[in-house]
Amino acid sequence: MGCVQSTGVDDEAKARNDEIENQLKRDRMMAKNEIKMLLLGAGESGKSTVLKQMKLIHHGGYNEQERDSYKEIIFSNTIQSMRAILEAMPQLDIPLQPQNDARRAVILALPPQIEGDVLPRDVADAVRGLWRDPGVKEAVRRSREFQLNDSAVYYFNAIDRMAAPGYMPTDQDILRSRVKTTGITETTFKVGELTYRLFDVGGQRSERKKWIHCFENVTALVFLVSLSEYDQMLYEDESVNRMQEALTLFDSICNSRWFVKTSIILFLNKIDLFAEKLPRSPLGDYFPDYQGGDNYDAACDYLLHRFVSLNQSAATKQIYAHYTCATDTQQIKFVLSAIQDILLQLHLRECGLL
């Protein structure tokens, strides 16, 4: 009697097993059409900007509501930058013209975050007037001596447009905006039959040992370096050079036991700022073994070699390097097209199809 009753139970168990098997098959098929990448790099290297470019290139860009939501960020970035300059000027022994004292007071009285989708007229007037001050311009030239957002000058020059009625952030305004990344974010986009999943772990550097093993099966690592930060110190620790920190981070990731055979796509980013800075801030002052003077190509080659030479598994791990300007959509589109070919080859090899 018991045996007769168990038939229904067996059928139910078999159906459940079949369902699980089918789901596993579907997962395996999906995995074959999926390319996972881990986005890494020191703070302010341009990771978030690359993700914004992905949205512009592959997701049809930003709608009006999304653009509107960036206004507060852009206004806050602008005010934070002017505040950083004004607070640094006494330490740099740079005077402000007396007629700008009232404008200085307006900026320093503001909260760190600007709320609202219209830039107040007195705030716009203060930024405009201060940006004409020779002392403010001198402080910007010496910005390696304090912490200043890369986009400060861009926003100061755009203050009239930003303060105009009906202002709507452009793609470039959005690309240059800065919000500190916290937590792990995922960006997904499709190219043909393939789905690309890009994980940004920006805010989790201090906890790296706890999460790094979760990504051992990624197709490739995308590592960003800000070339222009060779003469700057860390925001968190002003005794540590930012380029040295990037080299240390790259060394630990490149030679991690979790990524012994994982190829790395290296973005040597902010080439526009690097080229502009090199003649007035010698690379040799920070890397004494560099002998190329202010020659842009020599400086690029030197820094590329510093990163590539850290690879202790050159026989099994490839490093694909690209010089980039993450705010240049056309250039990033070209670079992404090039790395898609690389990723496809790596993916086919992973799936045993090469």
Image (cartoon, rainbow, N blue to C red):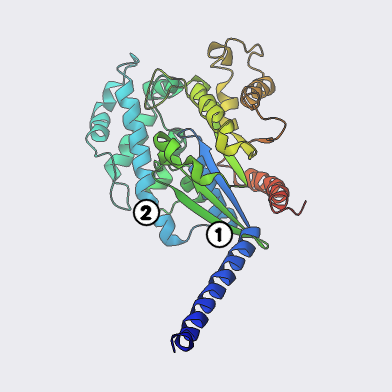
Residue occupied by mark 1: 59
Q: Is residue 82 visible?
A: yes
Q: Which of the two discs, 1 and 2, labels the residue nearer the N terminus?
A: 1
Q: Nearer the viewer, mark 1 or mark 2?
A: 1
- The answer to which image quadrant residue 353 occupies is bottom right
Residue occupied by mark 2: 165
Picture coordinates of residue 25, whole percent (x, y)? 61, 67
Q: Residue at x 43, y 34 (%)?
A: 152
- Between the C-alphas of marks 1 and 2, the distance is 28 Å
Q: Is residue 172 visible?
A: no
Q: Determine crowd level at label 1: few under 14, some 14-19, many 20+ residues with C-alpha closer than 10 A.
A: few
Tell me the kind of residue under disc 2: Pro
Q: Residue at x 33, y 28 (%)?
A: 84
The local secondary structure at tag 1 comes to: loop
Q: Determine crowd level at label 2: few under 14, some 14-19, many 20+ residues with C-alpha closer than 10 A.
A: few
Q: Considering only vertical position in the picture, is 325 above or below 293?
A: below
The local secondary structure at tag 2 comes to: loop
Q: Residue at x 58, y 69 (%)?
A: 21
Which of 128 and 220 lies nearest the eye of the viewer? Answer: 220
On-image quarter of the N terminus: bottom left
Q: Looking at the rendered structure, which numbered label has been put on residue 280?
A: none
Which of 354 and 161 lies nearest the eye of the viewer? Answer: 354
Tell me the kind of residue under disc 1: His
Q: Considering only vertical position in the picture, is 255 above or below 35?
A: above
Which of 265 and 92 lies nearest the eye of the viewer? Answer: 265
